Image (cartoon, helix red, strand yellow):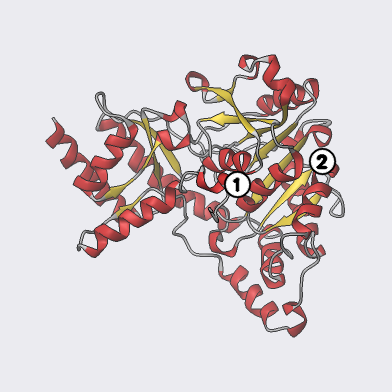
Amino acid sequence: MTFVSEKINTLPPYLFSEFQKRKKELEEKGIDVIDLGIGAPDLPTPDFVIDRLVEEARKPHNHRYSTYSGVQEFKLAVADFYKNHYDVDLDPNTEILALIGSKEGIANVVQAVINPGDSVLVPNPGYPVYRTAVHLAGGKCVDLPLDASNGYEPLFNEVAQKDTDAAKLMFLNYPSNPTAATVDFNVFLKAVSFSRNNDLIAVNDAAYDLVTFNNYTAPSIMQVPGAKNHAVEFGSLSKSFNMTGWRIGYLVGNETIIKALTTLKSNIDTCQFLPIQLAAATALTSDLAVVRANNKVYQERMEKLHKALNEMGLEADKPKGTIFIWAKVPTGHTSASFAGQLLENAGVIVTPGSAFGTAGEGYIRVTLSVTSDRLDEVILRMENMMRALG
């Protein structure tokens, strides 16, 4: 008799946990490993956010359960952020839901919407959690092709009609993990039109919406007229405010989806710790100066690493957002083989593009989450390895 479900037995290990295991093994051997694999900001959480957390944590009444959908101050802060940043009006009572990080919300929204056997359109390459969420819900993943030659824009017309007919959800992710692709408003206009014409819900994962460079501003799918009828959007404070471990995010948009996910989550969790929600509200209603300062740091790192990678022959487009660079591996290597050589011969962890879907083969994803001095060391090690490879 087996005590583990089939869906778990057939679920591959989470890629990034495997990398961390190998990193620990090498470090125990005395090897200095530089981790550019996982997308975790190394910059500090702003002091004013921490101060609010400490202040609220000292109040006994904040140690009770939160309301299931989130404390009102946090939801009002999300609404305020969308109005000020995107000129989008949201009803905090029906169109906003607090999450224990957007990753949790992504996994649960699939459970809340699809039935076993339903299809979900998933970008290829794309964040692996989309596919695992569909697997756990008993659904079927259908590739949403992306146009690599045109900034990884979705190729909606290349999805077979039988697949769109069977689909209830479609995931988008801009600014994108792993490709660092950014899009203009017109792409979201097409996405909402496609969703409306095929009676499905578009889900934009906007975890990197505020991490942008060179005067680029990422649009929101909620800016499209009528988007609330066929779209929702995930947001997170993890990357923009360096709050990954705090686990706080939100979902906005379609009232029916918000209600369904609230119902599911009320049977699974009791929302996030109240002081964390209140501290997050302070972050979202700030002047975002700390976000702009963070972006300046990331842009300096990006410019340095982007230049070096291209000079080494690892061709990469210059990102306008995210904390990633998406680079081609040298001829004669697969994504996994090149990432493996970097780890074993240079002590540098990167993520093979194949981890993000079949269309990611031939690329590596490199994060910008170490200091400029450590990036200099990365570049030196990679240059030495590339010379050794000939």
Query: Is there any visible trace of residue 77 in the rendered image?
Result: no
Going by the numbered disc 2, the residue's amino acid type is: Asn
Q: Residue at x 77, y 59 (%)?
A: 267
Pointer 1: residues within 10 angstroms few (<14), some, or many (20+)?
many
Q: Position of residue 347 (x, y in %)?
A: 24, 51
Q: Amino acid at mark 1?
A: Ala
> Image height check: is 247 above or below 320?
below
Circles 1 and 2: CB distance less than 8 Å? no
Disc 2 element: loop
| Quadrant of the frame with the C terminus | top left
Horizontal side of 240 relative to 262 (left or right) equals: left
Q: Residues within 10 Å of mark 2 (few under 14, many from 20)?
A: many
Residue 231 visible in rendering: yes
Question: In the picture, residue 67 is in which quadrant?
Answer: bottom right
Q: Secondary structure at mark 1?
A: loop
Q: Position of residue 270 (x, y in %)?
A: 74, 65
Q: Residue 389 at what x, y percent from top left?
A: 15, 33
C-alpha distance separating marks 1 and 2: 18 Å
Q: Which mark is drawn over residue 254?
A: 2
Corner quadrant of residue 364: top left
Mark number, residue 207: 1
Q: Which is nearer the N-term, disc 1 or disc 2? A: 1
Query: Taking 333 as reference, is 323 above or below it?
Result: below
- What residue occupies the far front of the structure in this picture? 1
Asked whether 141 or 374 is in front, the reply is: 141
Q: Which of these two is toward me, 240 or 303? A: 240
Residue depicted at x 67% and y 50%: 105
Residue visible at 77% across and 62% down in the picture: 70
Residue 98 x/y as whole percent:
73, 57
Check the image and report above or below for 2 versus 149: below
**Image label count:** 2
* Left or right position of 183 against 299: right
